[in-house]
Image (tube, rainbow, N blue to C red):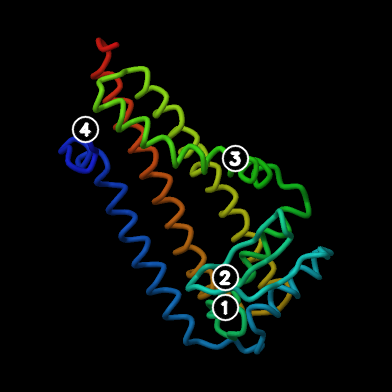
Amino acid sequence: MLLGLIDPLYIIIIAPGLALSLYATFRTKSTFSKYSKVGSRSGLTGAQAAEQMLKRQGVSGVRIERFGGWLSDHYDPSKKALRLSDDVYSSQSLSAIGVACHEAGHAIQDAHGYGMLSLRTALVPPTNFGSTFAYIALIAGFILHLKGLIFIGVCLFSVVVAFSLITLPVEWDASRRAKVAMDEAGMLSPEENRHASKVLNAAFLTYLAAAVTSVLTLLYYLIQLGMFGGDE
């Protein structure tokens, strides 16, 4: 019970989340790799597709930058920067266009004042704080048998869970915008759009797995907190 990783109860509770995480990681990598070998008929690169999508939506002032790392693509609202990995920025593949348009979807969310994105952005600092100090408080609380310290750890970890849950509609909406844009702008044919959508759907699984895992982890800590009900 001291450390979740050596507690059989933790393994039992968290197992579904871990299994989903492993499957999501495998599915994302395999799907991206498969369609990264399939070029689009339009010949657009990921960066060009993202730029075209932003222009069609009347969004300006967003920098599209090359960013190191594999599938490190992201949109930074604070810098108005859409950062695309090397495998996406200059590639003409269906995977690259799908991922680039997904990130452009986040930039459009930001420009249009999409509430859930604003909420997620606001939660970044407390989430970073919570993810750092929650485990410190929890481990110390379990060692010292201090219910109050465990409770603080649970509260801090709850912020992390909230962030994971709020991320789901944000990511789903960005993918929805991307799929519509790829179709309406004629970037991809209907068949190509279906393939690119498979990449986005697989990627969404990783966010779903993270949310499920965080909720199950919180459940474990709540159970542990109940077991310490008589401690001071």
Which quadrant holds the N terminus? top left
Q: Of the numbered discs in the image, which one, if any, rests on residue 99?
A: 2
Which mark's residue is nearer the viewer, 3 or 4?
4
Q: In which quarter of the image is residue 142?
A: top left
**Mark found first going from the N terminus, 1 or 3:** 1
Measured as percent of width and height from the top left, residue 172 is found at 56, 54
Hey, what amino acid is under mark 2? Answer: Val
**Mark closer to the chain start, 2 or 3:** 2
Instruction: Name the front one of labels 1 and 2.
Output: 1
- Which numbered disc covers residue 123? 3
Comparing 134 with 105, the one in front is 134
Which of discs 2 and 3 lies nearer the camera? The answer is 3
Residue at 51% from the left image edge and 75% from the top image edge: 195
Separation (CA) of disc 1 from disc 2? 7 Å
Percent x, y of residue 53:
74, 70
Q: How far apart are marks 4 and 1 (CA)?
A: 43 Å
Badge 1: residue crowd in 10 Å (few <14, some 14–19, many ≥20): many
Q: Earlier in the sequence, mark 2 or mark 4?
A: 4
- Say which label, 3 or 4, has the lower sequence index: 4
Labelled pair 1, 2 in contact (Cβ < 8 Å) = yes
Question: Does residue 223 lie above or below 92 as drawn?
Answer: above
